[in-house]
Amino acid sequence: MTKEQKSKLITLAKSLIGKPYKYGATPEEAPEFFDCSSFIQYIFKQIGIILPRSTILQAEHGEEVRLEDLEPGDLLFFHGERGFYNSKFPQGIGHVILYIGDNKTIHAASRRVQENPVKEVGEVEEQTLNKVTEKCKPLIVIKRL
């Protein structure tokens, strides 16, 4: 990813802060609603990078990097509350977050509300890397496109 693409990606991600979370949001619902993977798919598509719809398939793209080598534009993949599993990631992946630099991240965050039926609420939000890493752990893999 070029420096210009990274800049555009982060500017776009910041412009979507506050957009509502919707579990299973489809690409057609963007940019009005997002879940974590549709948010990532949407913003990368705007800079010309096509990614699959699900977190576990998104995690198969790019090169793996270490946490100490994190750069703006990198994607952090977590097990999440409901991990999806395959042979590449037997520990499961259920959430993806964009690192934007300066110890900050942006992601489509959600939380379950105990109503009948149970529903998820949330929005695209910016959080510190430390806070989101603690909340979403365990971290499974970091990828750079």
Image (cartoon, helix red, strand yellow):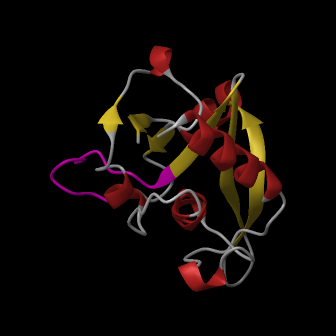
The magenta stretch spans residue 85: yes
The percent coordinates of residue 120 (x first, y second) are 69, 70
Work out whether residue 21 or residue 71 is closer to the camera in this orientation and state it: 71
Name the residue at 56% across, 38% down. 73
Name the residue at 49% across, 60% down. 48
The percent coordinates of residue 51 (x first, y second) are 41, 62
The quarter of the displayed image where residue 24 is located:
bottom right
- In which quadrant is the C terminus drawn? top left
Relative placement, left or right, of 96 versus 88 is right
Q: Residue lying at the far top in this picture: please name it.
A: 68
The percent coordinates of residue 143 (x first, y second) are 39, 37
Relative placement, left or right, of 40 versus 59 is right
Look at the image and tell me whether residue 88 can be seen. Answer: yes
Work out whether residue 96 or residue 5 is closer to the camera in this orientation and state it: 5
The magenta stretch spans residue 33: no
Q: Is residue 16 above or below residue 80?
A: below
Name the residue at 59% across, 62% down. 46
The quarter of the displayed image where residue 71 is located:
top right
The percent coordinates of residue 95 (x first, y second) are 50, 52
- Segment tinted magenta in the rendering: 84-95
Name the residue at 75% across, 47% down. 11
Q: How many marks?
A: 0
Considering the whole magenta stretch, tell me its main secondary structure: loop
Relative placement, left or right, of 48 versus 3 is left
Q: Residue lying at the far left in this picture: please name it.
A: 87
Look at the image and tell me whether residue 26 can be seen. Answer: no
